[in-house]
Image (spheres, rainbow, N blue to C red):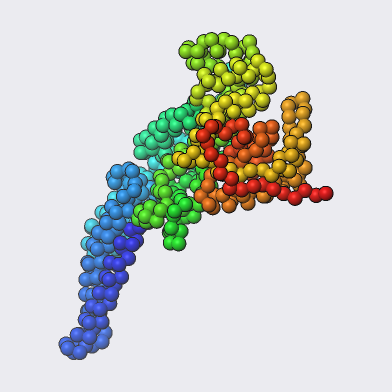
């Protein structure tokens, strides 16, 4: 960004210096009768000296203006930016010190000034180097401290400590540590609280705390998100840059200067940009966001996608106890008389797996009390509960006019799916011909792409008997695609058919 301010002054200064050299040489030879060598020596020295006197201050002022202007989007104060960006690399400081020493040996230059400034930079480089080494040692020591000595591992309680698996963990490379360190301006920990509130309001699920830790096996700018000890996502963040994420109305005809990538949370095309380019990206219609927000958004999406795995029986018990304070009758009638706590957990997991909010748990438990008197199969109860929550489900999918754009399934496709459902000891499973499955998914991909290009957020609509199986069939290729049954369409909601999945069946 600062280069845009420096470039014009630098070019103008060089041109002025060249004009001074040629003009002085001509005056010395033609007007003062000097020899060529004498004129060149005198006026070349004078012109270069004058050029340095004018160019160096202009260069410094331009860089300063560039720093001030290009940090407009940065949320930290200027002193912090200067400290972290100019003093981050001790090698650059040491190299600058050597250049100042070289300037000091130029004839006519103030040696004491350059040597003093060089010594100050060299001292700063040494301090930065010591801090860098100390930081690396501290990380290594933390890793070593995390390993319990062999004699301590023999104790049963310490073995259990080693085996403990945290529900949600975020591991980061060394360059990302400042994001969680308040002393370095990091506010990631502060942003976790609003994220937990948002997820609780959206899904009715209180996510557990996040375990933050560094990982020397990751690249310095890399992070890993783990659910119950298993990595489920990985991404990269460029510190000191902003992520410009492409939007539907973004002007992509003008290319951004930066590092092309994809938004880790949604896979949208994006570019890591800095300074002035971030302002330009915002003007072109990109959504510009800081590294902390990129990371917190990715974690939030992972939590929503894996909430059904994180929701444990213990957490369900806590939620049920909370409902029991105001609705003791419904809880007493349902658990354990009609349905076990594990059965309730399974139903809640099925709901939030498809991002159906369980915030109104009292209503869900009342419906389960009614339905479980007839059927106690968790999958069947989940479908019946979804139907009773039709107004809530449709309100999140419909437009302001109460219209839901849907992609329907051809009757022959629905029949093929229905006939492929088999009952097993573990419940109903779909045993659809692989070739037919591929044809359905390929046709559905075309319909979804067409609907998305037209500005719709499509929903698949099918009959209630096959809805859960269609969802399982499509969730690997289309994890965010919602599948509804006809019984889940609330009154006053209008359906707009924007596509149909039909395939040819062999004779």
Asked whether, in this view, residue 262 is left or right of residue 471, the answer is: left
Q: Please state the total of marks drawn on the protein image.
A: 0
- x then y, percent, for residue 381: 64, 23
User: Residue at horizontal 24%, vertical 70%?
Assistant: 51
Q: Which image quarter is the N terminus in? A: bottom left
Name the quadrant containing residue 280. Answer: bottom left
- Report if residue 122 is visible in the image: no
Q: Quadrant of residue 186?
A: top left
The residue located at (34%, 46%) in the rendering is 74
Q: Nearer the viewer, residue 222 or 503?
A: 503
Q: Residue furthest left?
A: 32
Left or right of 430? Residue 260 is left
Spot occupied by residue 156 in the image (x, y as percentages of width and height): 61, 17
Left or right for 504, reference 196:
right
- Residue 417 seen anywhere in this rendered image of the structure: yes
In this rendering, is residue 70 above or below 6?
above
Q: In the image as oriented, which residue stretches furthest toward the right?
A: 507
Q: Nearer the viewer, residue 377 or 174?
A: 377
Q: Is residue 255 above or below residue 341?
A: below
At 30% from the left and 61% from the top, the residue drawn is 5
Residue 45: x %, y % from top left = 24, 75
Q: Quadrant of residue 407?
A: top right
Q: Residue furthest front?
A: 492
Pick whichever, 306 or 423, lies toward us.
423
**Residue at 30% from the left image edge and 70% from the top image edge:** 11
Please determine whether, in this image, residue 60 is positioned above or below residue 129: below
Q: Position of residue 319 (x, y in %)?
A: 52, 19
Residue 13 vs residue 398, the one in the foreground: 398
**For this view, does 91 lie left or right of residue 230?**
left
């Amino acid at each position: 960004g600062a280069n845009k301010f420096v470039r014009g002054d630098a070019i103008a200064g060089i041109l002025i210096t060249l004009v001074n050299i040629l003009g002085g040489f001509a005056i010395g030879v033609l007007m003062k009768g000097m020899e060529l060598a004498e004129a060149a020596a005198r006026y070349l020295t004078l012109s270069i000296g004058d050029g340095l006197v004018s160019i160096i201050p202009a260069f410094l002022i331009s860089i300063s203006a560039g720093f001030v202007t290009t940090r407009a989007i940065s949320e930290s104060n200027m002193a912090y930016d200067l400290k972290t960006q100019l003093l981050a690399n001790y090698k650059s400081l040491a190299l600058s010190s050597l250049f100042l020493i070289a300037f000091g040996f130029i004839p006519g230059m103030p040696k004491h000034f350059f040597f003093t400034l060089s010594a100050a930079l060299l001292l700063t480089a040494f301090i930065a180097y010591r801090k860098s080494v100390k930081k690396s040692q501290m990380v290594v020591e933390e890793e070593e401290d995390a390993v319990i000595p062999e004699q301590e591992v023999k104790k049963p309680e310490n073995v259990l400590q080693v085996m403990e698996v945290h529900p949600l963990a975020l591991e980061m490379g060394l360059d990302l540590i400042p994001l969680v360190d308040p002393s370095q301006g990091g506010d990631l920990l502060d942003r976790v609280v609003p994220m937990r509130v948002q997820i609780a309001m959206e899904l009715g699920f209180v996510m557990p705390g996040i375990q933050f830790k560094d990982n020397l096996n990751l690249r310095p700018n890399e992070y890993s998100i783990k659910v119950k000890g298993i990595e489920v996502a990985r991404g990269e963040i460029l510190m000191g840059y902003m992520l410009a994420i492409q939007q539907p109305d973004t002007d992509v005809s003008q290319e951004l200067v930066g590092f092309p990538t994809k938004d880790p949370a949604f896979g949208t095309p994006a570019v890591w940009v800095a300074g002035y380019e971030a302002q330009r990206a915002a003007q072109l219609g990109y959504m510009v966001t800081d590294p902390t927000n990129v990371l917190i958004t990715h974690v939030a999406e992972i939590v929503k996608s894996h909430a059904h795995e994180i929701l444990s029986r213990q957490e369900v018990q806590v939620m049920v106890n909370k409902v029991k304070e105001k609705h003791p009758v419904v809880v007493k009638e349902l658990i354990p008389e009609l349905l076990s706590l594990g059965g309730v957990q399974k139903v809640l997991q099925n709901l939030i797996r498809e991002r159906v909010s369980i915030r109104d748990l009292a209503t869900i438990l009342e419906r389960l009390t009614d339905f479980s008197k007839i059927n106690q199969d968790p999958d069947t109860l989940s479908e019946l509960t979804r139907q009773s929550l039709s107004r809530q489900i449709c309100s999140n999918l419909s437009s302001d006019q109460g219209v839901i754009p849907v992609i329907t399934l051809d009757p022959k496709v629905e029949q093929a799916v229905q006939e492929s459902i088999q009952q097993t000891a573990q419940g109903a499973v779909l045993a659809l011909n692989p070739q037919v499955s591929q044809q359905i998914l390929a046709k559905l991909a075309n319909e979804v792409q067409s609907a998305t290009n037209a500005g719709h957020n499509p929903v698949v609509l099918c009959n209630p008997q096959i809805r859960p199986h269609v969802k399982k069939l499509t969730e690997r290729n289309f994890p965010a695609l919602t599948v509804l049954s006809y019984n889940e369409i609330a009154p006053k909601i209008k359906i707009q058919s924007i596509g149909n999945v039909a395939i040819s069946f062999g004779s």
